[in-house]
Amino acid sequence: MTSSTIHRVTTLDLAVRPIAWPFAEERRAEIAAHFAEKQRERPKIWNGRILLGRDAVFTDGHLAGTYFETDFASFLAWRDWGFPDPAVFNGFGMGALRASDGAFLMGEMAHHTVNGGRIYFPSGTPDLDDVRDGVLDIPGSVVREIEEETGLIPADYAAEAEWHCVVTGQAIAMMQILNLDMPGEAARTRIEANLADQAEPELSAIHLVRGMDDLTPTMPRFVTAFIAQQFASR
């Protein structure tokens, strides 16, 4: 199992620059064939533009890095083929929803999504909508993903200032705890009602995590590492 390292930071400095990615350019035909196969399995996925990172540096409560634009097909091939370019990382924001009774809320991805069946906090691979004045706005990305996936808006939660950056292999999950002023079951009921109103929701179910016994193999390592740390500190 891939181990995880957790860095706690208060500032994110993530510049977006035009960088050519040799992997995507040199293996274009293979990447296209791989994506076509994935689309046959899940016809709803599309080859949009996304952002990946490189040169991540953690120093004194600070994370710096550089992001570049590429297509989703190249990202998917890079991920599925075991990260052949180790200089690149997938860095994304996650809103760790925590209810007033201490339960964390996670969503199960719907089957039509590329990560169907996986369970984790609301999140998404950064894209061009998350760029502000040449900088990747991870806090804004978290707000957007939370609203899109759950219907919750910033007035519904209090965001903590600290980021828990969980580094697992080539992934950096930048997690921000969002404290809800309602217990877990009430929060789940509210989110499920929102999902029922959506024509094609990204989430198929909401799971409450109250302790280590609630973790499952369908949760990524960066999620279980974060949860383990949180419950160990209580």
Image: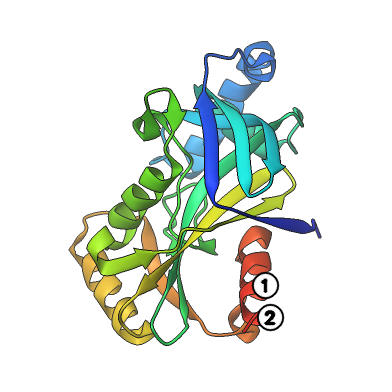
Q: Residue at x 41, y 51 (%)?
A: 112
Q: Is residue 197 left or right of residue 43?
A: left
In front of the other: 192 or 157: 157
Residue matched to label 1 = 229
Q: State the image coordinates of residue 19 (x, y, percent, origin top left).
A: 58, 14
Label 1 packing within 10 angstroms: few (<14), some (14-19), many (20+): few
Q: State the image coordinates of residue 217 (x, y, percent, origin top left).
A: 66, 69
Q: Residue at x 66, y 36 (%)?
A: 89
Q: Residue at x 22, y 66 (%)?
A: 194
Q: Residue furthest front?
A: 60
Label 2 sits on a secondary structure element that is helix
- Say above or below: 73 vs 194: above
Q: Amino acid at mark 1?
A: Gln
Query: Quadrant of the rendered structure where residue 212 is?
Result: bottom right
Q: Report whether residue 23 is seen.
A: yes
Label 1 sits on a secondary structure element that is helix
Number of numbered labels in the structure image: 2
Query: Quadrant of the rendered structure where residue 137 is?
Result: top left
Q: Is residue 185 left or right of residue 190?
A: right
Structural distance between the alpha carbons of marks 1 and 2: 5 Å
Q: Report whether residue 35 is seen.
A: no
Question: Can you tell which mark lies on residue 198?
Answer: none
Residue matched to label 2 = 232
Q: Amino acid at mark 2?
A: Ala
Contact, mark 1 vs mark 2 (Cβ under 8 Å) = yes
